[in-house]
Image (cartoon, grey):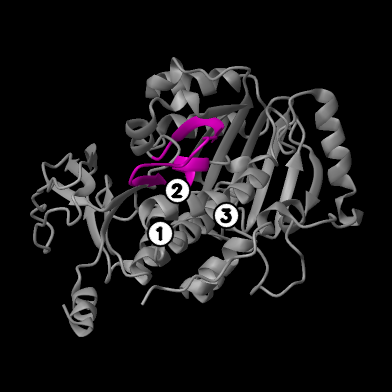
Amino acid sequence: MTRTGQLTDIRTAPRREVLISGAGIAGPALAFWLNRYGYAVTVVEKADTPRSGGYPIDVRGTALEVVRRMGILPQLRDAHIDSRRFTFLDGDGGEVASVNPHTVGGSAEGRDLDVRDLEVRRGDLTDALYTAVRDDVEFLFNDSIETLDQSDQSGRSSQSSRSSRSGRSSRSSRSGHGVDVTFRGGGRRTFDMVFGADGLHSRTRQSLFGPEEQFHRYLGYCFAVFTMPNTFALSHEIMMWNTPGRAAALYAVGDDDEVHAFLNFARPAPPSGAFRDPEAQRDLVAAVFADAGWEVPNMIAAMRDADDLFIDVVSQIRMPRWSRGRVALVGDAAYAPSFLTGQGTSLALVGAYMLAGSLAGRDAAEGFAAYEHHTREFVTVNQEQIGEGDAALFPTTARALERRNDMLRTLGTMPPAEGRPAHSALTLPEFTPPR
């Protein structure tokens, strides 16, 4: 074959086809970058539509550079919540201190919003990510992965049929290697690689590595989040009530008629039995806060009727490796840091960028190895910000609570933290798309 013929074959070769499970934050971010590097990307999501709403989240440090390179930073700047006050209350509802939320969160007050940490509604970020990829990436909503089968026999062609929702034709694995996927909706397809971006309780991780328990690190707290009427007329602010081992907060992201309610409590071991039943979950939370003051009784009543209630344990996912064969994990599925670090969203965005870039011009084995080598230290540094039961906002003893309150009363005069913060511990590399 002539050299010209070889070049023609390369240029007309089919794009490598990959599947991402999960359309939250890590999934669409990974889809964006994989598409940029020449992959044909499909995203499967069990929900009917992209998920909007949700608790406010932070985009910090290195992740700000990721969203800037994606071209969505101006949109997120416009959606910045800019909370103005964080008021801490004692057990009787009396004010302990009122501080600037950026000081508590570690942002540099007075810096330009181009470089300062961003706080946005989760739905604003997911909308921005989805809009950035929806015209270039195939989305399969109301579906999920049922089974994964990694074929690894040279010379065997793994034939699969396309879902009726896909406009792409069926194919066989070109190299005799691939991942055969059966979908819950009945479709069967073969992909060159599959990525699990399906969150803390990832089914992809379970099917690949086994039960979650072996990677789950419980941090000593349980929490409940939901929305309720804004009876306080709160605006751009947070109010948090604390007693040892318990916290209740109301979070107004604007001037809305509703606020985000948050209940957090310490517990030596995760209440796995109660968490299998929604009513048992509500009963457990109500029992923990039965004698609480301030507005907590009204919050418990609202929790009983909330249709968006989410209850879970505070935990991390720690794994010795994030891939196996042609399947890799990203975001919370691989390395959930817990909301106590404020870095879950940022790790998802940075991890997606690093995974896609590591695969540019490489095969799965080489790309996945590079992804872990260059990203793991950043993940570890961020996860290790929090130890079991030592979250500064949620002291578990009277002495620790008093120390925290003393610190809050003098927060305005505290010197800035020294050294490079964990959320900026990785300098984002430039990846070159293969030609």
Dot 3 lies on which element?
A: helix
In contact (CB < 8 Å): disc 3 and disc 1 = no
Q: Is residue 81 left or right of residue 406?
A: left
Tell me if I can see residue 79 in this picture.
Answer: no
Quadrant of residue 46 within the rendered picture: top left
Tell me if I can see residue 369 in this picture.
Answer: yes
Label 2, label 1: how far apart the Cα atoms are: 9 Å
Q: Kindly identify which residue carries mark 1.
A: 30
Q: Nearer the viewer, residue 246 or 16?
A: 16
Q: Residue at x 38, y 54 (%)?
A: 27
Residue 123: x and y in percent read: 43, 57
Dot 2 lies on which element?
A: loop
In contact (CB < 8 Å): disc 2 and disc 1 = yes
Task: Name the amino acid, label 3.
Answer: His
Q: Kindly identify which residue carries mark 3.
A: 374
Quadrant of residue 68 within the rendered picture: bottom right
Residues shaded magenta: 308-335
Q: Is residue 3 above or below residue 214?
A: below
Lower sequence index among marks 2 and 1 = 1
Task: Name the amino acid, label 1.
Answer: Leu
Dot 1 lies on which element?
A: helix
Q: Is residue 265 above or below residue 27?
A: above
Q: Kindly identify which residue carries mark 2.
A: 330
Q: Residue at x 17, y 39 (%)?
A: 184
Q: Which mark is residue 51?
A: none
Residue 225: x and y in percent read: 51, 38
